[in-house]
Amino acid sequence: MARSADSGLLRYFLRRLAVMLGLLVLVSVLIFAMVEILPGDVGNLILGQYATAENVDLVRQQLGLDRPLAVRYLDWMGGFLTGDWGDSWRLGTPLAPLIGRRLYNSVVLAGVAFAFVIPVSITAGIVSALRRDRLTDRVINGISVVSITIPEFVSSMFLILFFSLLLPWFPSSAMVPEDAGPLTTLRYLALPVIAISPVLIGYIARTVRASMITELGADYTRTAYLKGLDPRTVITKHVLRNALLPAITVIANQIAWLVGGLVVIEAVFNYPGIGQLLLQAALVQDVPMLEAIVLILAAILMLSNLAADLLYTMLNPRVRAQATGGAT
Amino acid sequence: MIGTRLRTLLASPGVTLAVAVVLGWLAIAVIWPLLVPYGPTAQQLGGRYAPPSAEHWLGTDNLGRDVLSRILAGSRSVLIVGLASTTLGVAVGTTLGLVAGFYRGRVDELLMRSLDLLMAFPIIVIASVILAMLGPSRLNLVLVIALMLAPYNARVVRSAVLSWRDRDFVAAARLRGESGAYILFRELLPNIMGTVNVEFTMRLALSIFAVATLSFLGFGIQPPTPDWGLMVSEGRPFYQIAPWVVVAPAAAIASLVVAINVVAQRLRAS
Amino acid sequence: MSASAGVLRVEGLTVEYRVGGTAFPAVRDVSFSIGSGESMGLVGESGSGKTTLGMAILRYLPENGSIAQGSIFFDGTDLVPLGRRELSRIRGNRIAMVYQNPASALNPSLRAGEQIAEVYRAHLGLGRDAARERAETMLDLVQIPDPHGAYDRYPHQFSGGQKQRIVIGMALAMDPSLLILDEPTTGLDVTVEAEIVELFTDLRARFDTAILFISHDIGLVATVCERVGVLYRGEMVETGATAATFQRPTNPYTRGLLSCRVPPGASKESRRLEPLPAGSRDPEPGACSFEPRCAFREPRCRQEHPALYDAGGGQRSRCFFHETVAEAGPPAVTDVATQPAAPSDGTLLEVRGLRKVFRSGGREVVAVEGADFTLAAGRILGVVGESGSGKTTLARVIAGLEVPDEGRVVLAGVDVTKPAHKRTVEARRALQMVFQHPDGTLNPSMRIGQILRRQMHMLSPDGGADAEQTLADILKAVQLDPEHLDVRPRQLSGGQQQRVAIARAFSTSPDLVVLDEPTSALDVSVQAAILNLLIDLQRREDASYLLISHDLAVVRYLADDILVMHQGRIVEHGPAADVFDSPQEEYTRKLLSAVTVHAGKLASAGPPARAQDTAGGPVRT
Ligand SMILES: Nc1ncnc2c1ncn2[C@@H]1O[C@H](COP(=O)(O)OP(=O)(O)OP(=O)(O)O)[C@@H](O)[C@H]1O
Ligand code: SF4
Ligand SMILES: [Mg+2]
């Protein structure tokens, strides 16, 4: 029985992966189309407004822009899959290594942020639900209402003014020196992480609180109490098991938000991540760079959503049964 | 009904304050020309980086412009773009949510999957890319933010519709031969108006969040229009010598979004 | 009185709920006791405080609920002052509970066996294997097939009846001395209900557990319990031995509850129902709570609050005039029974080869298969079957809310096999529907007048001139006032909402009315009035009914013909008397015998049972 369930799950996973790849192709077409079709002539973009018509044509030819759209798309995708992501228009350097480096930096920042956000938010959500309508809950709730709405650049500016200018505890730039050890690195990342976290913590905590409250009021919770189980067992064994499931989905959704936050945070703190690169590419309309970054981000986001979905399916027997066609 | 609504809103002092802040900013956005002590774009090269004083309550910026005047004037662009994009986004989202939730089946699948796809992307990233390509006009800003808000709104409305569509009064309407539009807008919509109102308020906070952030990044409101997000980004290079240039607009943004969200949470709770 | 008199002795218990700053008592000054091994029933209308009382005994009340007064002696100890720790030692061990809706009583993400095993671990400190072994034994005892395999399955992999067995197993795990059952079979199919009741009977012989059986189903209580208590507005208004109490009620409320039931085996030709008046006002403070609805009231009842008096025969009754009530005997039957429907040969509805399949996620469910029948003008056709047998789908296809995959629906000679909005106005006028849930049937954002006028506007466009007259007439027919036109559905009671729904259906003089469980969501006292109303309207308008109900007594009472459905197919179709008295099909016999298990018992105990038919319905009250 276990075996057939596993193969059911595997089949489900492969099906979802196939769908995701299909969607990714669709997204790549969209990105390509959006960037290529939108107004603004590339020759002029590169050479400036006063370039002569011949020079513009020459640049277009060099870039292969005179070929049909479909050919260019296939060329682009082919290159992408083989690791040749083309060159930046502005910098003239190959994109893949640059993006790779920047992506790595961003993943470090995001990793530290999540390592901070997830335990804090889940704990806050659980505590808030258990102390429902008491002072603790009101305080946590108040903080999350406020923190959800304040744009990251606003909180960053306040943090810099307080903890860098007024009290010189942390550097205002997150440019980690080359030879920094882990502790120094953390000191440099502290302000960006603190700035990006409140929104994420607010959302996750509120979801956890809501689902905790639903599950605490569920009939099976009453059953567990009326069996004579002690409250701790009821919470840890019965309630949390069901209440934390929705957190998986929210956390996955928050990855998209985190990426958006990264764009802002990296700009404010001068952090050499993918967000900053994206921002620069957008501001100077470096088309190949934009396309590559957006596609990479799309792939990462879709993969993380898929992973969350699978985790959710695996941990939830009822959903698992539906997903695997009731094989269990 | 409106009376009881208002009463629950004003029940707690915190919420009353929030309502006052929102209304205050709305009023300022309309009548700021009567209030400002200086022209918001008037430069005074002699008086650059002046700290807060009796003449310039909030000091002056790098071009010697009066920060208070710019803050008051800046409320207008944020609120216009915020309100317009929220209205558009919620109207489109609510319609999509009604249609998807009521018709279910393929329409629903297709709509929701495409919206999921849209939502899987960070708003700011998509908006930056589109605005970078289209150019940052105010209309484009409204359209892009509306496009980004609509899916979230559609989802919430859809799930509200799901809890209503299978009630028997909908079946009764179908038996009478009512059109789809009648059922959507006359039978279902009035019952989910509470949800839509809460949504509007929450999305408004999010929309202002987005306008401010995009302006800060350089894709939103363009200089020399006075705008809060823009002011933070213009003041940033000089924050060490003139922190008030940054603090004032940052605080203005925070006060507006937090106040709106407090109202939204209160509406949702009641 | 010594505490050892019984397992449970409740004394002067008052439970309050605090809502928006004010406390209101949901249970008032209730006293009773249960001897060891004894079973006591608790009956009363919805909201009378049955669940609150049960939960208070386990000291498990919602956050806003609290015990304001009284004691709960269990095995000699008062539970009221106990702390959390002491309570956990008693809960699940000495007192256990089973309640409605087994689907949600089990944790969806824990294995079924584990949920029983943890009881042994918590109370006996057993190790993993020993607990598992005991749990498997328990699964076997509650007749779950393959206990070893079942242990590892999740709740969603069991049927509703099996889930309830698991919950019962959980409750009986520690062989408690008191078991509280709150509507343990409500929502289960009659056949499953019969099995569960049988299981209780078996297990009681084995476990010698005292039972507090909470139910709104008087028939079921008559079967299961030796003694009964009747709650009204949180007060115990009558207690006594079940048989004696139902035979000779000494409280007007008990009497009313008994007489407004649809008597098992009765039909509309044999007698008219006796509704319990709804009561148009709240009782005055200090008066008898039942006074506004009481047929026996005297001026004294408005001035004094009656105590619980000894009414003889071991019964106690909260009524000044319990002797008068006891002597009054069964309520006089008004013999204005309905004339039998005239046999008619005009076919109104013809259904041919109907098939409807639901597809979701690659799976197919055949809801209706090969349905073939006709319905003559002016007759009532009852459709019965277990849940999931396709009754509602059949009705929805006929009404045009679903489109069949195969087959035809012909109404008055016109093919109407299409969705409602594609049918002609005439076809839509001719066929109306009344639904199950009174709170969902009317749009909460509209006023009653708007709802009714829109209906008439859409379906009789030319009747504009006398529309207001028709409206007044129909309102009168369903016993609502013109003032009701200006209110919103929320301001009406469930029974009134259902009257509006009926008015809506009849406002355009339909030829066929589809009634999908029209009284299932209503209290028994309201049900009788609605059924009477439906009979009167049918006669007045000469309409045909397609009546769907899982309540066989209601169907037996109302219908001229019966159609039995099983797994999407029609297995039997014939005149009501024939189908009920001499069922031809095995399945029909099973269905009918399931409900006679307890209906039969009450038929001999209850006063108003005149008809001698053996068949009857689940006496859902
Ligand atoms: N948590 C609560 N807060 C406030 N009032 C409540 C609460 N729970 C129940 N009540 C009220 O207390 C009264 C008794 O309710 P209870 O659920 O005990 O009745 P019941 O007899 O079990 O009804 P039913 O047959 O519908 O199950 C009702 O008026 C109900 O509305
Ligand atoms: S005391 Fe009076 S009102 Fe109350 S039940 Fe008896 S007769 Fe009726
Ligand atoms: Mg109850």
Image: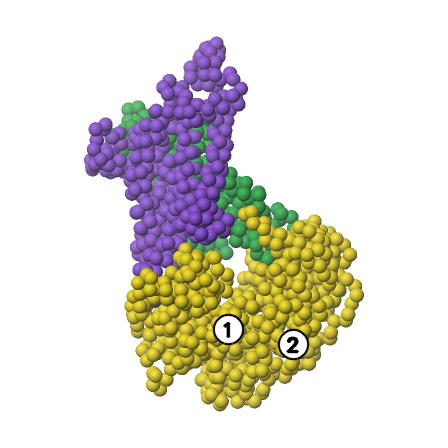
Q: Nearer the viewer, residue A91 or C509?
A: A91
User: Could you say where residue B60 lies in the image, as x and y percent from the top left?
Assistant: 30, 30
Q: Secondary structure at mark 1?
A: helix
Q: What is the letter of the yellow chain?
A: C
Amino acid type of the residue tagged 2 in the rendering: Ala
Q: Nearer the viewer, residue A203 or C580?
A: C580
User: Could you say where residue C425 lies in the image, as x and y percent from the top left?
Assistant: 72, 53
Q: Residue at x 50, y 44 (%)?
A: B154
Q: For chain A, give the colour.
A: purple
Mark 2 belongs to chain: C
Amino acid type of the residue tagged 1 in the rendering: Glu
Q: Nearer the viewer, mark 2 or mark 1?
A: 1
Mark 2–mark 1 Cα distance, whole angstroms, equals: 26 Å
Question: In the rendered image, which quarter contains the N terminus of chain C?
Answer: bottom left
Number of on-image labels: 2
Report whether C535 appears left or right of A293.
right
Q: Nearer the viewer, residue A253 or C169?
A: C169
Q: Quadrant of residue C173?
A: bottom left
Q: What is the letter of the green chain?
A: B
> Earlier along the polypeptide chain: callout 2 or callout 1?
1
User: Could you say where residue B103 lies in the image, as x and y percent from the top left?
Assistant: 58, 47
Quickly name the residue at label 2.
C266
Question: In the rendered image, which quarter contains the C terminus of chain C?
Answer: bottom right
Q: Residue at x 44, y 23 (%)?
A: A79
Q: Secondary structure at mark 2?
A: loop
User: In this view of the protein, can residue C400 be seen by the observer?
Assistant: yes
